[in-house]
Image (cartoon, helix red, strand yellow):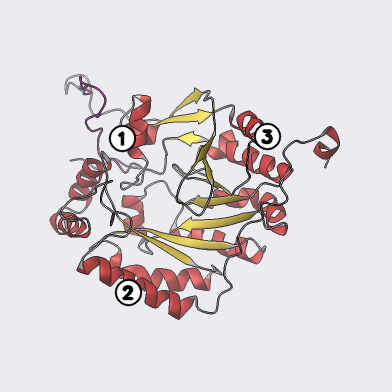
């Protein structure tokens, strides 16, 4: 298949919820080449914005955007685009839904008597600092609202655009109301450009982590996902660079390709790494009992088997070597929460 510049998905794939499938047709006599896919911004007006998340270190998630320009070929959020009648392939990267009423809904949630404050995770599904955020500024408005209400928030991103909001984050950090994690799973820029085509460079992510850490904002990294035969050999090197940049810790996840993520990733790896594709896919299957991914598989998050054991042991070694003397992350403070904002408070 043809590589598409600036995209992770090579093509759209079969949509699980549509009985009839449509394909784009381009007559050689009419089109010299397929037109470039441009990002389409679509307004949506959801009824809720705060999602309760069970079994995670945070209590809620907030996603101002559906779909993600970053185009990561392995992204677990791709199947969620199908609930909007779009495709998990190219559509996920080029048809972006943005929640215009995000702040209004957040304020209404905070004002409910039944609301119990717990850390809100931004980017629980798609990246809150993807490129369109520089124009729409929904994430910035959400952070301003959290600061006003003294509500704790956790951020995960692959984009150095977060530096735009460094002053906001500093104010939140003064009251132990924020923590930031950067997704960094490789130091190989050529792999990054193929696998995560529209994310910030690794160099810029590490630089952003360093700047936040120097400003007193608790910052760490997530190596996610670790992919055997692609980036699994880089674990210790990534951990060393994160520690050097001032990160206080590193988390790790092993790749799992559930639902329609699997065909997107398989198309991608066969297009970009054809000689290595079978090895990559077969080793992923050894992590998940012969499947590329299975939501019902209890080993799904960390994998199982010999390759998984080696990855985990390497990760544990890295923690001891680079992070044993780092300060541990404090739990974010929920006790300062202000449910309703008076006009006097708004002045500040």
**Counting residues from the N terminus, which is met first, the one under dot 3 or under dot 2?**
3
Rendering coords of residue 77 (x, y %) = 37, 41
146 horizontally vs 341: left or right: left
**Mark 3 neighbour class, 10 Å CA radius: few under 14, some 14 to 19, many 20 or more:** few
In this picture, is 141 found above or below 316? above
Q: CA distance from mark 3 to mark 2?
A: 46 Å
Q: From which residue to which does the magenta span run?
A: 9-24
Q: CA distance from mark 1 to mark 2?
A: 33 Å
Q: Secondary structure at mark 3?
A: loop
Q: Secondary structure at mark 2?
A: helix
Rendering coords of residue 192 (x, y %) = 36, 55
Tell me, for residue 313, which label it has, or none: 2
Q: Which residue is mark 3?
A: 113
Q: Nearer the viewer, residue 233 or 120?
A: 120
Asked if residue 13 lies in the magenta stretch, the reply is: yes
- SS assignment for the magenta stretch, majority: loop
The answer to whether the residue labelled 1 contacts the one labelled 3, judged by CB atoms less than 8 Å apart, is no
Q: Which residue is mark 1?
A: 88
């Amino acid at each position: 298949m043809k590589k598409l510049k600036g995209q992770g998905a090579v093509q759209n794939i079969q949509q699980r919820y549509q009985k009839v499938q449509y394909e784009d047709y381009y007559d050689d006599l009419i089109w010299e080449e397929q037109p470039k896919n441009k990002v389409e911004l679509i307004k949506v007006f959801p009824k809720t914005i705060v999602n309760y998340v069970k079994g995670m270190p945070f209590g809620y998630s907030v996603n101002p955007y559906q779909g993600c320009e970053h185009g990561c070929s392995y992204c677990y959020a791709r199947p969620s685009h199908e609930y909007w009648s779009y495709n998990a392939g190219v559509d996920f990267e080029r048809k972006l839904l943005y929640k215009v009423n995000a702040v209004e809904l957040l304020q209404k949630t905070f004002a409910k008597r039944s609301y119990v404050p717990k850390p809100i995770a931004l980017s629980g599904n798609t990246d809150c600092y993807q490129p369109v955020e520089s124009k729409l500024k929904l994430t910035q408005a959400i952070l301003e609202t959290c600061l006003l209400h003294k509500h704790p928030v956790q951020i995960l991103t692959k984009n150095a655009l977060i530096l735009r909001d460094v002053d906001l984050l500093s104010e939140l950090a003064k009251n132990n109301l924020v923590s930031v994690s950067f997704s960094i799973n490789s130091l190989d820029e050529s792999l990054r450009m193929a696998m995560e085509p529209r994310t910030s460079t690794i160099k810029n992510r590490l630089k952003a982590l360093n700047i936040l850490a120097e400003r007193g904002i608790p910052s760490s990294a997530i190596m996610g996902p670790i992919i055997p035969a692609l980036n699994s050999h880089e674990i210790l090197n990534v951990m060393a660079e994160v520690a050097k940049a001032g990160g206080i810790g590193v988390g790790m996840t092993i790749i799992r390709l559930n639902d329609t993520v699997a065909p997107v990733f398989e198309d991608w790896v066969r297009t970009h790494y054809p000689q290595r594709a079978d090895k990559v896919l077969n080793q992923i299957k050894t992590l998940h009992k012969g499947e590329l991914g299975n939501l019902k598989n209890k080993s799904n998050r960390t994998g199982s088997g010999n390759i998984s054991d080696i990855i985990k042991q390497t990760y544990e070694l890295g923690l001891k070597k680079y992070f044993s003397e780092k300060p541990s992350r404090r739990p974010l403070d929920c006790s300062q929460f202000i449910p309703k904002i008076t006009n006097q408070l708004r002045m500040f």
